[in-house]
Image (cartoon, rainbow, N blue to C red):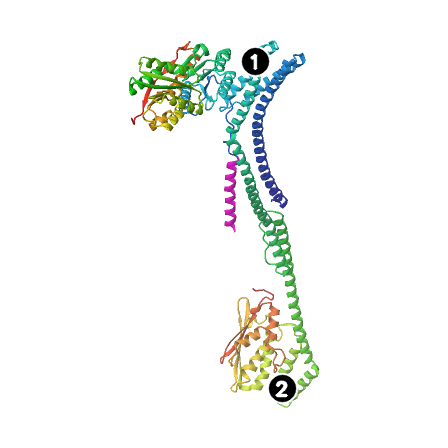
Amino acid sequence: MYITLGIVFVSLCYLIFVSANIVFRNDLELPNAKKQTDSQYRLVFITRDMDTTFWNKVGSGAARQAEIEGASLEIWGSYSSNLDEFLKKLELAIHSKVDGIIVQGLDTDEFKELTKVKAAFYGIPIITVANDVPMKASLRRTYVGSNQFQAGSLIASELLNDMGAEGNVVLLYDSQQEYYQKERLNGIEETLMKYPNIKTLYAETSESRDQVISTMRDVLNQMPDVDAFIAVNANMIGPMVQEIGKRSQVEPYFIYTFDDGPESLPLLNEGKIDGVIKQDPEKMGEVSVEQLIKWLNGETVPLDINGYFTDIHILKDVKK
Amino acid sequence: MISIQKKILMLTTVVIVIMSIIWITLTFYNYKTQVKYNDILNRYLILNDVSRSSNQVITDLNNFMIQPTPYNLRKLERSKKMMESAKYEVFNVRTEVNQFTLTNYIHLMDSLIETTDRLIGLERDSEAAVKDLAETTRIGNYISDMTLTLIDMELKTHEPFYRGIMEQSIELVKLGIWMILLTSLLLLMATYWFSLSITRPIQQLTEAASDISKGRFDKEITVKTNDEITFLAKTFDHMRSNINNLIQQIKETAKLEYELQQNKILLQESHFRSLQSQINPHFLFNTLNTLSKKAYLEGSEEISDLLVSVADLLRYNLKQIDRSVTLRDELMIVKQYMEIQKARFTDRLQLQLEIDDSCIDVEIPALTLQPIIENAVIYAIEPRVDGGKITIRIKNEADFVKVEIADDGMGMSTEKITQILTERQVESEGHSTGIGFSNVVKRLRLFYERKDVITIESTLDSGTTVRLKIPKKRGEKHD
C-alpha cells in the first residue's frame, strides 16, 4: 500500500518536473532586438543569373570578402536573365539607399538610366562585375572582372593553335550586343584578322534557345564546310552543341566558349567542346567588394575607371 | 494543546496555500505568454501600418495631383505624418536577422517622402511630374512587397518560437493534470491522517466506555493526543477511578455487614440450642441435687460426685453462650466433663494435664475447649477397645497462650481437617452440648478476628493435635 503510494508519488513528481521544465523553459526568446543602426556598410550584389555556378561563385566570393571587411552584403537578383525583375531589384536597391551596389552589367537603356540618373542622384556608387558597361554610359565607379578583349584574343589564339591558320570559323553572339560581348568579339577579330586564310562568319541571334537552334541551322546550311565555332555568349553553347550533334559528330569541330554559361563546364568535361576560357568569379566577387569599400572609406578615390582585371586562362578538353 | 479546530484550520490553510501557489504560477505564466503574444502581434501590426500608410500617401498624392486643393494638400500632409510616425515604430521591429531589409525598408519610406515632397513643388502636368508620380507608385509597390517579405521573414525567424509556444501550451495541460493528481493524492493522504488523529482517540474512548459499561473499572484510560479528546479522556478516567473507589468501599461495607450477620446467626443458633436444653432446668438441677444427696446418704459417694459434675456441666452450658469466660473456667468445666467420661470409660480414658497456671486468666469464648475434647473422646477413645490418652497442655508464650489438645487416636484425613477449618462440617450427633467442632472454629475466629487462632495437625493412626493460639490482648489484628 505504502510502496504503491510512494511509486505513484515519485512518478507524479517526475512527470511534473519534466512538464514544468518544458513549460517554464526560457530559451524561447524572440531574436535579439537591435535598436542601434549599425555603422557597417550595406552592400547589394545584383545578378540576373541567380543559382548558376559562375554567379554563385561571384556571390560567395563577395560574401566572404564582405564578412572580412565587416560589411553586410545581400545577394539579390533574377533568374534566367529575367530583365524586368533584374531592373526592379536595381531600382529597389537605389530607393533603399544602400551604401553600394555591385551589379552584373547590362548594356540597355533602362539599366543606364538607373545607374546614371537615379543612382547618381542618391549618390550610390555602382561597380559592374564580370559584364561591363562603359563608364561613360553608366557612370559606374569601376569594373571588376576579366579583360574581355584579352579573353577574346586568348580564345582566338587557342583556336589558331588547334586548327592552324586556315579554316572557317562561326562566331555566335546575341543580338543584344552587350559591351562585354563586343569586347570579346573585338578581341577575337583582332587576332584572326592577321590570318587572311581564316574566314569568319558572324551569326547574330537572340538568347532564347529556339532562336539559337534555328540560327545554328541556318549557319550550318550556309557554310557546310565550317571548321570551328566560338560561342561568344556562353549561354548559347548548350543549344549550339545540341544542333551540331543532330547533324554530325561533334568531335571533328573545334568548339570554344567562355565559362559564364551554365552548360560550359559540363560540356567540356563530356569532351563535346574543345576549350573554355576560365575566368575567376570568386576573385571578381572579392575584388569588387574590396574596391567598393575602399572607395566608401575614401582610401582609393577615384577608382580605376578602366577596371580591375582578374585572371583568365584556357581550359582544354583533356581527352583530345 | 492543539485544538481540533486549529488542526482543521491548519489543513485548510495548507490547501489554500498550495492552490494559491499553483494559481499564481499559472497566472504569472499566462501573463508572460500574453506579453509575448502582444509583442509578436505588435510587430505584424507595425509592418502592416507602414504598408497601409504608404498606400494612403500615394492615394492622397494622386488625389492632390488631380485636384490640387488645399484640402487635398492637408490630407496629403496628414497621411505623410502618419507614415513618418509609422516609420519610427518600425525601429522597434529591428532584429539581427532583418536589420538589412529593415534599413532598406526605412530608406524606401524616406525615398517615398522625398519624391512626394519633390512632386508637390513641381508643375502639375510637366513630364517630370508624371514620371515622379509613376515612381512614387513604384516605390509604394516596393514598400508593399517588402512588407510581405518582412512578414515572411518574421514568420521564418519566429517559427521555432511559435512552435515552442504551442508545445508549451500542450505541456501546460499535462502539467495541470499531473498537478491535480498530485495535489489530490497529497490531500487524500493528509485528510486520512488528520481524520485518523481525531477518530483514533475517540475509538479508544469508546472502547474504554464499553469496558466501563461492562463493569471493568480497574483499566486505566490512556489517550495519547494533544487535543480536546485528551481532556475528555482524563476527565473520564477520573470518573472511572472515583467509581472504582466507591465500589470498593461498598464492597467492604457489605463484607462487614455480612460478617455481622453471620455472627448473629451463630449466636441465635446457640441460643436456640441452649433454649432447647433449658426446658426445665431448675427442675433438672433440683432432681440431680436430690439424687446426689440421696446417693451420698445411701453411701454411694461416687455416684453423688458424678451427679454433681453433671449438674455443674449442665449449669455451665445453660448460661448465656455469648459471654466470655476465662481459660480457668473452661478448664474447670473440662475437668467436670472428664469426670463424667471417666465414669463411663473407666481405665480406657487417660487424661494428662500440663498446665502453666500463670496464664490461665486469659479471656476465651465460653464452651470452646469442651467441644474439642468431646470430639477427641468421640473419635479417639470411643471406637477403641483399649482406650486412649488425651493430653491438655497450656503454655505461656510471649504474646499469646498456647493450648494443645492432643490424642493418640486414629487421626483425621486432610480432607476432614480442611472441612473443619473451612467451617463446613455438618454437626454430627453425639455431642453433649450440641455444639460441633466447626462452630467452635467459627466462634474463635469471630472472637479474635484472626484466622490462625486454631490449627489442626494430624497423622493417620498416631493421633491428632489441636492447637489454639489465644492472644493475650483481644482484638489485636494480624495479617
Q: Magenta span covers which residues?
A: A1-23
Dominant SS of magenta comes to helix
- Up the image or down, A124 lies above or below A24; here it is above
Task: Judge whether residue A3 is colored magenta.
Answer: yes
Same subunit, tags 1 and 2: yes
Question: How many numbered marks have been drawn onto this rendered protein structure?
Answer: 2
Q: Amino acid at mark 2?
A: Ser
Question: Can the viewer see residue A36?
Answer: no
The disc, 1 or 2, on the residue closer to the chain's N-terminal end is 1
Where residue A319 appears, as percent x and y from the top left, is: 29, 27
Left-right relation of A216 to B102: left
Q: Quadrant of residue A60?
A: top left
Question: Can the viewer see residue B232?
Answer: yes
Camera-side residue: A254 or B280? A254
Q: Which mark is residue B131?
A: 1
Left-right relation of A256 to B299: left
- Up the image or down, B145 lies above or below A14; here it is above
Camera-side residue: B2 or B468? B2
Q: Amino acid at mark 1?
A: Lys
Where residue B273 appears, as percent x and y from the top left, is: 67, 78
Q: Which mark is residue B304?
A: 2
| Residue depicted at x 67% and y 71% | B264
